Image (cartoon, rainbow, N blue to C red):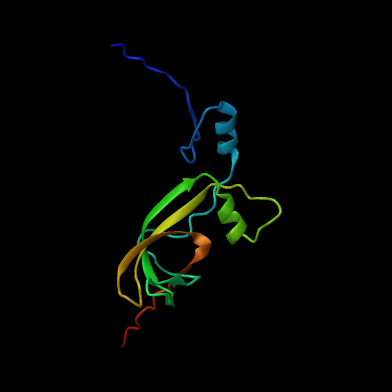
Amino acid sequence: MKKIIEKQTFWQCRTCKAKYKKKRDAADCERKGTEEQVFQIGDSVRNREPRQCHNGKNYHFHGKIIKVVGPEPPDEDYERRWLGGQSERLNNHVYSYVVEYRCSICREKKEAIYFAPELLPIKRRKNKKSS
């Protein structure tokens, strides 16, 4: 029996770690900008668009960011849907956020991945100290 080993060379973008077969493609990816990281782990957020519970009712959740993913390669669908379908794409590396939340209808604990424009921050109220 013979062991056959194939050797392939890939080029990697330093920003998003995506692998490319062509050096030029990796260099093009590296030249792209990176969107600002809006949320941090532990931030409280709520969703802009309603989700649907398995029983068919819509709801908005309040949850926490449990993981920040990225920067990742540009996402065309994300840019079209959340950045207004501009005629020219921004073509930036993007961050996504893993949110842990509880369905307000069935109380089931869930996780979902969102991009920054899909989420709104929940500001905590500061307690007033009584004197």
Residue extending farthest to the left is 1
Which image quadrant is residue 30 in?
top right
Q: In the rendered view, tell whether residue 128 sits above or below residue 96.
A: below
- Residue 59: image location, x then y, percent: 43, 76
Front in this rendered view, residue 86 or 40: 86
Q: What is the quadrant of the C terminus in the image?
A: bottom left
Q: In the rendered view, tell whether residue 23 sits above or below residue 120.
A: above
Front in this rendered view, residue 49 or 16: 49
Residue extending farthest to the right is 87
Q: What is the quadrant of the N terminus in the image?
A: top left
Residue placed at 32% from the left, 14% from the top?
3
Residue placed at 45% from the left, 21% from the top?
8
Residue extending farthest to the top is 2
Which image quadrant is residue 128 in?
bottom left
Residue placed at 40% from the left, 54% from the top?
68
Residue extending farthest to the front is 1
Numbered label tally: 0
Q: In the rendered view, tell whether residue 3 sits above or below residue 130.
A: above
- Residue 10: image location, x then y, percent: 48, 26
- Residue 118: image location, x then y, percent: 50, 64
Which image quadrant is residue 64 in?
bottom left
Residue placed at 68% from the left, 56% from the top?
86
In the rendered structure, the answer to whether residue 67 lies left or right of residue 74 reads left
